[in-house]
Amino acid sequence: MSEYGTYLSIFLAITCWSVALVSLRRPARIAWTAGLIFYLVHIVFAFDAFYQWSHRVAMEVTARETAAVAGLATGMGLWVNYVFGLILALDVFQQWRNDRRRFALAIDWLVLFMILNGAVIFAEGITRLYGIVLFVIVIVMRWSKHRS
C-alpha cells in the first residue's frame, strides 16, 4: 500500500502544481496547497515503503539512484527535497496569510525543476511520459501567457 501511495501522491502533487502554474489566482492557491499536501504525504509513504523510516537508508538509496542516472553517487538530492518542501510550505503559508507570493517566479521555476528531475529524469515508463507531457504543457502555457 505504501509503495502505491508513494507513486499516487507524487502523481497528484505534480498534477496540482502544474494546474497551479497555469491557472488563475484563487484556483492556483488551492492547487498549490493541495500539491504541498500530496508532496508531504509522498514523503511519508516513501519513508515507509522504501527507506524503513531511516534517513541513512534514504541517503543510501538516493545515492544509488543518482549514480545510476547521473554517474555521481550522492544523497544530496534528498536534502534538496527537504529544502524544496520547506520553501514550498513557506510559499503556501505566505499565500494564505497575505494573499500573495514572495519570490513567486523563482519558486515556480524551482517547482518546474523538481518536476523535470523527479518525473522525467529520474522516472521511468509511463511516469516519465506523464512527466514530459505535463512539463511541456506547463512550459508552453506559461510562455504563451507571458507573450500575450
Image (cartoon, rainbow, N blue to C red):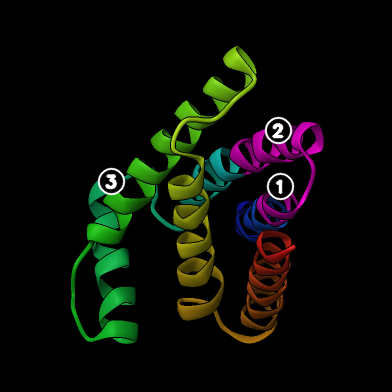
Asked if 11 appears above or below 122 in the picture, the reply is above
Asked if 68 appears above or below 18 in the picture, the reply is below
Residue receiving disc 3: 55
Dot 2 alpha-carbon crowd within 10 angstroms: few under 14, some 14 to 19, many 20 or more: many
Q: Earlier in the sequence, mark 3 or mark 2?
A: 2
* Contact, mark 1 vs mark 2 (Cβ under 8 Å): yes
Q: Quadrant of the C terminus?
A: bottom right
Dot 1 alpha-carbon crowd within 10 angstroms: few under 14, some 14 to 19, many 20 or more: many
Residue 4 seen in this snapshot: yes
Residue receiving disc 1: 20
Residue 70: in magenta span = no
Asked if 13 appears above or below 113 in the picture, the reply is above
Left or right placement of residue 87 versus residue 101 in this view: left
Residue receiving disc 2: 29
The three-letter amino acid code for the residue at tag 1 is: Ala
The three-letter amino acid code for the residue at tag 2 is: Arg
Out of 146 and 135, give the one closest to the viewer: 146
Judge depth for marks 3 and 2 and give the one in front: 2
Residue 1 seen in this snapshot: no
The three-letter amino acid code for the residue at tag 3 is: His
**For residue 14, which quarter of the picture?**
bottom right
Dot 3 alpha-carbon crowd within 10 angstroms: few under 14, some 14 to 19, many 20 or more: few
Judge depth for marks 3 and 1 and give the one in front: 1
Can you give x and y, in whole percent of width and height, for residue 39 in the image? 57, 45
Q: Earlier in the sequence, mark 1 or mark 2?
A: 1
Looking at the rendered structure, the secondary structure element under dot 2 is helix
Q: Which residues are magenta?
A: 16-38
Left or right placement of residue 80 versus residue 9 in this view: left
